[in-house]
Amino acid sequence: MSQRETTQGGELILRLLDEMGTAVKGRTMMQKIVFILRSKFGKFHDYLYTIHYYGPFSRDLADDLDRLRLQGLIEETPVLTGDTVRYDITITDEGRTVARTGASSKVPLRDMVRVAHELNAAKLNDVIDEAYAIAAKGLD
């Protein structure tokens, strides 16, 4: 993969972050948001999930997020939360350009963005519980 190439899922992540217009509250929240959106909207099939420490986890998604960060398309900002650190995820200006010109730029995401906002605003434990409930029906 070249310096600026992204996977189909990576492009969709950039679109989602661009249209959300706000930071996703940590890597764990991002994992759960994408898992729940995958279940509700049939997108993000690039990402295979297994049950991990905090519910469904995708190594593929983690790798895409690392790749997007290394390419300068997203940023992770450490945020101290009690005695732990979470890494909030935002899109960069360069990431916005890629999101708005990529192959998936024509796919409407309004409903997905609405659900992502609702999840991102919820307590992480509640989102993890929702992800577990979906996973109990099958990870497919």
Image (cartoon, grey):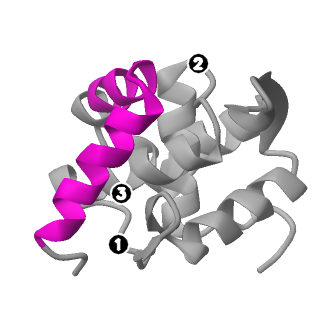
Q: Are marks 2 and 1 in contact (CB under 8 Å)?
A: no
Residue situated in front as seen by the camera: 126 or 106? 126
Q: Please tell me which of labels 2 and 1 falls first in the chain.
A: 2
In magenta segment, residue 16 = no
Residue situated in front as seen by the camera: 4 or 17? 17
Label the magenta part by its dominant secondary structure: helix
The image shows a total of numbered marks equal to 3
Name the residue type under label 1.
His
> The N terminus appears in which quarter of the rendering?
bottom right
Q: Which residue is mark 3?
A: 35
Q: Nearer the viewer, mark 3 or mark 1?
A: 3
Which percent across, then down, holds residue 66?
77, 61
Name the residue type under label 3.
Phe
Which percent across, then down, holds residue 5?
72, 67
Q: Residue at x 37, y 46 (%)?
A: 128
Q: Disc 2 on helix, strand or loop?
A: loop
Within-10-Å neighbours for mark 3: few <14, some 14–19, many 20+:
many
Q: Which residues are magenta?
A: 113-137
Q: Quadrant of residue 56?
A: bottom left
Q: Residue at x 89, y 57 (%)?
A: 70
User: Which labelled disc corresponds to residue 63?
Assistant: none
Q: Which residue is mark 1?
A: 45
Q: Which residue is mark 2?
A: 22
Q: Please tell me which of labels 3 and 1 falls first in the chain.
A: 3
**Direction from residue 138 to residue 51 in the image, left or right:** right
**Direction from residue 69 to residue 58 in the image, left or right:** left
